[in-house]
């Protein structure tokens, strides 16, 4: 089979990652005889002006950032109407995989990683670029353990007044999202500081500070609830490091340190670790130095108060709340359409296994196409798992008539099960596929069970909705 060659130069070798907007391939650069990473915009977005501009902006943003801890852009172009960006290829794992594999990391390692990430982001901030999606999945580790920050896909210049990410639009990953970002309000460089604070917390504790069932539940916690101290989960954390993370997780962005101050504090702490740390007097962090800041622009105010009393901020955020109301009192929409059915994550179905990325199951019902649940990687021939298969378990607010599955790894085979029986026959899942359930279906606990991986080592399920 002839390998696909992009722009007459880049020979695609393997799909190594995929999101809601693009796929990333390992490729061979025939001109310079080296491996590269090729990010290709999904074809379905090729005629969408918003996605095209976001994709082009990523290339422009990262092209400005020549830094040892930021993935380097090599090339950009169009091939057969498919937009692509070429990056240096990083052989290794991402930081999320490291934590999933190793659990909480040693304090000294957290400090070293944190310094490198903070230096990269401080460099971007100095050039007017806010990342907006800082998370462990976007931190790559090369074979020597050095950090490379990647995926500036929703990055935005600080001076942009009009564009594709305006007030009221919620972008980012909910586990790491800053309160102002979750509320659809304007963000700045201190939004990245908050997200990095969550990352440092997770590296130390082995879990995020605000777990939850879905995007809305987690985002509301970021907006309203004070973050728990990392000392509660990791008592051996140096008090000064815990205090720094507390300041990074301040609800109001003006109360957070700058990224430069984070670098200075982490470097000081690195010098205080080891044997000296046992005897050193840990100083309290100095009050962050504040730059003069313009008066805050007020965005959209509170739009609605849910029955439980939660304040919902921002038009887009309100829409997410309405989608996920579930059993909390559903009302028919004014156009007379069917009442929406809420889905809630339960876990995974893994015969002869111990679960597969259970913590990612909420991603399939968060209404964020870029996030997903994924299977582990398998090398069995013909798309087999070496067992019956794997699946995700969801609970519906009432029995649905159909499930709609969206994926960015089409070609796998799945069916819907409940109570040990198959209630929707097996079919090959395309980009978006509907599973019709029996007319007399009374089941609310449903399993989307994948029986064959198709052409992929790992399968993604980006979204599941019920009708």
Image (cartoon, rainbow, N blue to C red):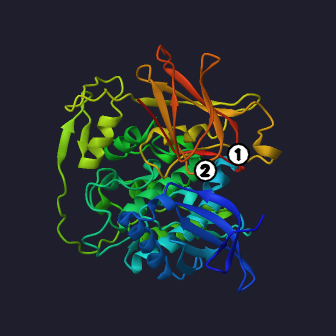
Q: Is residue 96 visible?
A: yes
**In the picture provided, is 380 more to the left or to the right than 114?**
right
Instruction: Return the residue at label 1.
Output: 454
| Rendered location of residue 208, percent (x, y) | 51, 45
Residue that appears at 59% across and 67% down: 270
| Rendered location of residue 75, percent (x, y) | 57, 81
Residue that appears at 31% across and 26% down: 339
**Mark positioned earlier in the residue sequence (1 or 2):** 2
Instruction: Return the residue at label 2.
Output: 409
Q: Residues within 10 Å of mark 1 (few under 14, many from 20)?
A: many
| Rendered location of residue 269, percent (x, y) | 55, 65
Check disc 1 and report its element: helix, strand or loop: loop
- Numbered mark located on residue 296 in the image: none
* Location of residue 306 with respect to 380 vertically, above or below: above
Check disc 2 and report its element: helix, strand or loop: loop
Relative depth, front residue between 392 and 5: 5
Q: Seen from this angle, which residue lies furthest bottom?
A: 32
């Amino acid at each position: 089979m002839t390998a696909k060659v992009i722009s007459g130069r880049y020979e695609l070798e393997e799909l190594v990652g995929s999101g809601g907007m693009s796929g990333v391939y390992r490729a061979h650069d025939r001109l310079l005889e080296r491996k590269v990473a090729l990010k290709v915009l999904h074809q379905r977005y090729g005629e969408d002006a918003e996605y095209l501009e976001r994709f082009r902006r990523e290339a422009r943003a990262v092209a400005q950032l020549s830094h040892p801890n930021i993935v380097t852009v090599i090339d950009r172009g169009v091939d057969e109407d498919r937009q692509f960006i070429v990056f240096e290829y990083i052989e290794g794992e991402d930081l999320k995989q490291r934590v999933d594999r190793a659990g909480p990391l040693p304090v000294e390692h957290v400090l070293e990683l944190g310094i490198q990430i903070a230096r990269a982001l401080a460099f971007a901030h100095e050039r007017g670029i806010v990342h907006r999606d800082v998370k462990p999945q976007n931190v790559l580790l090369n074979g020597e353990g050095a950090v490379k920050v990647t995926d500036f896909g929703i990055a935005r210049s600080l001076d942009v007044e009009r564009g594709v990410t305006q007030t009221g639009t919620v972008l980012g990953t909910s586990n790491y999202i800053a309160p102002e970002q979750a509320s659809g309000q304007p963000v700045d460089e201190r939004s990245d500081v908050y997200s990095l604070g969550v990352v440092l917390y997770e590296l130390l504790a082995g879990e995020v500070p605000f777990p939850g069932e879905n995007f809305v539940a987690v985002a509301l916690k970021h907006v309203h609830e004070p973050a728990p101290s990392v000392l509660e989960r990791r008592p051996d954390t140096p008090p000064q490091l815990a205090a720094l993370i507390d300041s990074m997780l301040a609800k109001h962005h003006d109360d957070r340190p700058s990224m430069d101050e984070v670098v200075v504090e982490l470097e000081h702490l690195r010098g205080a670790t080891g044997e000296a740390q046992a005897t050193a007097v840990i100083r309290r962090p100095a009050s962050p130095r504040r730059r003069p800041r313009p008066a805050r622009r007020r965005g959209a105010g509170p739009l609605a108060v849910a029955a439980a009393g939660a304040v919902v901020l921002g038009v887009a955020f309100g829409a997410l709340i309405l989608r996920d109301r579930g059993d909390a009192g559903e009302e028919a929409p004014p156009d007379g359409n069917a009442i929406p059915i809420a889905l809630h994550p339960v876990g995974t179905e893994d015969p002869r296994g111990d679960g597969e990325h259970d913590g990612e199951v909420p991603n399939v019902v968060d209404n964020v196409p870029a996030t997903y649940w994924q299977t582990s990687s398998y090398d069995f021939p013909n798309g087999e798992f070496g067992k019956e298969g794997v699946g995700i378990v969801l609970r519906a607010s009432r029995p649905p008539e159909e499930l709609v599955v969206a994926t960015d790894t089409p070609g796998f085979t799945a069916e819907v099960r409940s109570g040990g029986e198959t209630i929707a026959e097996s079919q090959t899942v395309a980009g978006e596929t509907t599973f019709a359930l029996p007319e007399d279906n009374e089941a609310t606990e449903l399993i989307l069970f994948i029986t064959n991986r198709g052409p992929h080592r790992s399968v993604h399920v980006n979204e599941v909705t019920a009708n």
